[in-house]
Image: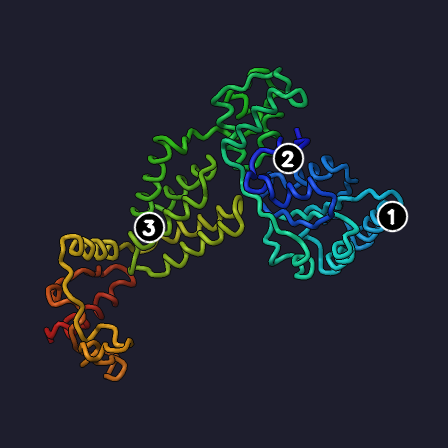
Amino acid sequence: MRPRSLDEVIGQRHLLGPGTPLRRLVESEAPMSLFLWGPPGTGKTTLAYVVSNVTKRRFVEVSAVSAGVKDVRTAIENARRELGMTGRQTVLFVDEVHRFNKAQQDALLPAVENRWVTFIGATTENPFFSVISPLLSRSLLLTLESLTDDDVGAVLDRAVADERGLNGRVTLRPEAREQLVRLAGGDARRSLTYLEAAALLADDVTVEVVEKAVDKAAVRYDRQGDQHYDVISAFIKSMRGSDADAALHYLARMVEAGEDPRFIARRIVVFASEDVGMADPTALQVAVAAAQAVEFIGLPEGRINLAQAVIHCALAPKSNAVVKAIGAAQADVRAGHIGQVPPHLRDAHYPGAKKLGHGEAYRYPHDFDHGVVRQDYAPEELRDRRYYEPTTHGAEAPVAERWGKLRAFLRGER
């Protein structure tokens, strides 16, 4: 089912439009070098094959898993000979190029620099960390995105109907199609593998056939419907209730159902401030780190980072004082309780500010004992307002004690 032209490629619309590097490569005779960076099953190898087929270039594939420097040099020498004798260009495709060591990547440089080959390197890892700078600077870097559910569905529909695929011999039920899309997780190759396995079992592919074919129970979960909202609600409430086991169950349900891991990570980051807050300030650090890890490595490994953040947040002492504080402050602002910024706190850096009294009588806290000095900070109308009311849970207990003393001192209550 590999596409035979760029127009048959599903997904990656940002790379396939008029005037894009791939279009230019196909439409012109000039060789160029590309790095295709993206998750598995997004079409990196497919695009390399299409470029070769459409332009009638000779296609040579080298696997970075098994090839050495000698193999690379042999492939380049053969391409150079072919170019000299027949004028036919060669597409040298290196899969998993990030697995090449520095010496192997160095061996590619002459061919890239002298345009002896059209070099295409495919990688699932960030090339800025895994590819040497001289090679990267001589190549275009194209980033492939995970296929959408609609894209994967289109891949399945084509495979069912196309003569190169199942040629209409199999009926794919809507529920089974939906399950295959979920299981694929944006990976077209995986969706076709599962479809093929199911088609070997029955001509009428139902959810039960898919479950049997891939040995994986269907997770009833609609990312646009009630299950989505019910499960994420139960997930948040389980963490809030400090039940790490239940929270992990709902995390697993979302991951297995193909929920966007970035959505899960965002909810954990919000939870870390909304429900843990100052009771354990490290919860936000862990949540943000997990979100960054998911962006960096994706699934399936990213589920481990999410699980760590979930366990940390679930077991952390809880406080909603932060969300209550900002909520109370916003409520006052929306009600019109704003007031003027005290003159001594206003910006005094621009010409004429001092004539207006801006910054006058401002007391610099670092010049006083303990780095604290009594002066008015809030607008006059709001000096008695109290927004942050810390709990005595976890790490917020000493914060509550310190804030109580600071507030009393600043307000002139002691």
Q: Residue at x 66, y 47 (%)?
A: 122
Q: Which residue type carries mark 3?
A: Phe
**Image mark for residue 407:** none
Q: Which residue is drawn at 50% across and 31% down?
A: 150
Q: Which of 208 and 124 is in front in this view?
A: 124
Q: Which residue type carries mark 1?
A: Gly
Does 310 sit left or right of 102 as displayed? Answer: left
Above or below, 299 relative to 126: above
Crowdedness near tag 3: few (<14), some (14–19) or many (≥20) residues, C-alpha within 10 Å = many
Coloring scheme of the render?
A: rainbow
What separation in Å lies between label 1 and label 2 (alpha carbons)?
Answer: 29 Å
Q: Which residue is drawn at 29% across and 76% down?
A: 349
What separation in Å lies between label 1 and label 3 (alpha carbons)?
Answer: 63 Å
Q: Which of marks 1 and 2 is nearer the N terminus?
A: 2
Residue 87 position by quadrant: top right
x and y, in percent, of residue 151 in the image: 53, 32
The residue singled out by tag 1 in the image is 84
Q: Residue furthest right?
A: 85
**Image mark for residue 271:** 3
x and y, in percent, of residue 8 in the image: 62, 30
Q: Which of 88 and 196 is in front in this view?
A: 88
